[in-house]
Amino acid sequence: MATIEPFTGVIYNQRVEHDLGTVLAPPYDVISSGMQDELYGRSPHNVVRLILGRQFSDDSDANNRYTRAAGVLRNWMDDGTLTRTEAPAIYLYAQRYTVEGTARERVGFMCRIKLSPLGKDVHPHERTLAGPKLDRLMLTRACRMNFSPVFGLYADEGRALDTLFARHMEHAVPDVDVTDAENVEHRMWIITDPAVTGEAKRFMADKPVVIADGHHRYETALNYRNERRAAEGDPAGDQPYDFGLMYLSNIHGQGFTVLPTHRMVGELESPPTAEALANKLAADFDITPLRANHARAEELVAGLRGAGRKGPSFAVYTGGGKALMITLKPGVAASVTGPAAELLGRLDVIALQELVFEKTLGVTKADVEAKRRVSYTIDPREAMGRVDEGAVNFAFLMNPTGAEQVMRVALGGGVMPQKSTYFYPKLISGLVMNPLY
């Protein structure tokens, strides 16, 4: 179960940086090259210089994005741009946002969590790739710092911590209050009161945690811990690197939003027509041909939502105004073995991968892992528009995977394909960092 601790975090010094909106950034893995340039231009102290520094053609082992990040970090600590909190704290973090015209607020808190092998106290729900883990490991080695939190889920229908935090939010002024380019308001309270931090620690002691986002960062933290312990002769007692930075939020709290991640499939040698695809899938799925238009994608999304109430469903846009509504037939399940097989076999993302991509289109798991043939977006209009442009062959629109489904699969030992979930909004980087020394 989760062992959490308050910690003396590294934060931006607001006596030096008066406008934190200029120095915070999205998570590194959603920063495009254009966004990277914009963040560099926003402030000489933007956290992008730490989490995703620029690369140059003459980079070497002695001078690269990781060594430069370490140098920037040292300079900012020395000149007071960054500072340590005065006492161990947990960092209450609330995000106000609007989705589909509804205002919501997701609340959680950041802390240190004792690292344990995946599947013991902390459970994954998605597969990971080697490349991002090596990148984050090299950054951690150079800087000895967690710059961005892993996003963890726990379940508490009684909302004990939510109630505790709501009282604090009602009576205390936030230490940070910024609104980002997507109009998401990020507020953070630094809580050093031992009564509150102690209650959070006690409450989480019997709660398993499921990773919502940041699987690569968690595995990197484990790898780094193992390296440090081996290099230092496996010292007795907890060391700073035995912990990682995590944001924890209750799936039964207010404001949880999981968006679907739509799939675009391209580079097929002989893509079937809409009619041929329907014939190929008819053994496993109930299929309804539809007329559709990318300019009115929300109509197809609404129909998909209704189909999803009958069973695992997705819609495929084949171009030329044609679409198929596809629902897994009762009694049919994708062939899945191992933990949580029964749950996984009836998930729409698994049915899509096994019964459509693999069985019908010849798009393998190796293709998906190598980022061949399949790309992703949370915007259904974009997905359908790319079919009409001829950039891809098909757009598969998905329903969201619920947070409770994620918890059930993960705690049952199962893992979903990559991009099964998109927890919105993303956590902003730069609010608090966790030193590993």
Image (cartoon, helix red, strand yellow):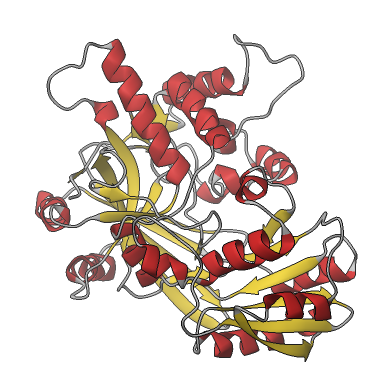
> Picture coordinates of residue 250 (x, y %)?
29, 66
The residue located at (82%, 61%) in the rendering is: 392
Location of the C terminus (image quadrant): top left
> Picture coordinates of residue 130 (x, y %)?
53, 34
Q: Position of 81 compared to 373: left or right?
A: left
Rendered position, 283 above or below 127: below
Does any portion of residue 424 appear in the rendered image?
A: no
Nearest the eye: 303 or 430: 303
Does any portion of residue 110 appear in the rendered image?
A: yes
Q: Position of 56 compared to 176: left or right?
A: right
Nearest the eye: 394 or 210: 394
Nearest the eye: 253 or 366: 366
> Picture coordinates of residue 414 (x, y %)?
37, 57
Rendered position, 294 above or below 70: below
**Among all residues in the image, which is located at the extreme top?**
62
Q: Position of 183 compared to 297: left or right?
A: left
Rendered position, 71 above or below 288: above
The residue located at (41%, 59%) in the rendering is: 187
* Rendering quarter of residue 11: top left
The residue located at (47%, 27%) in the rendering is: 137
Q: How many marks?
A: 0
Rendered position, 235 above or below 96: above
The residue located at (70%, 73%) in the rendering is: 380
> Picture coordinates of residue 84 (x, y %)?
32, 33
* Rendering quarter of residue 109: bottom left
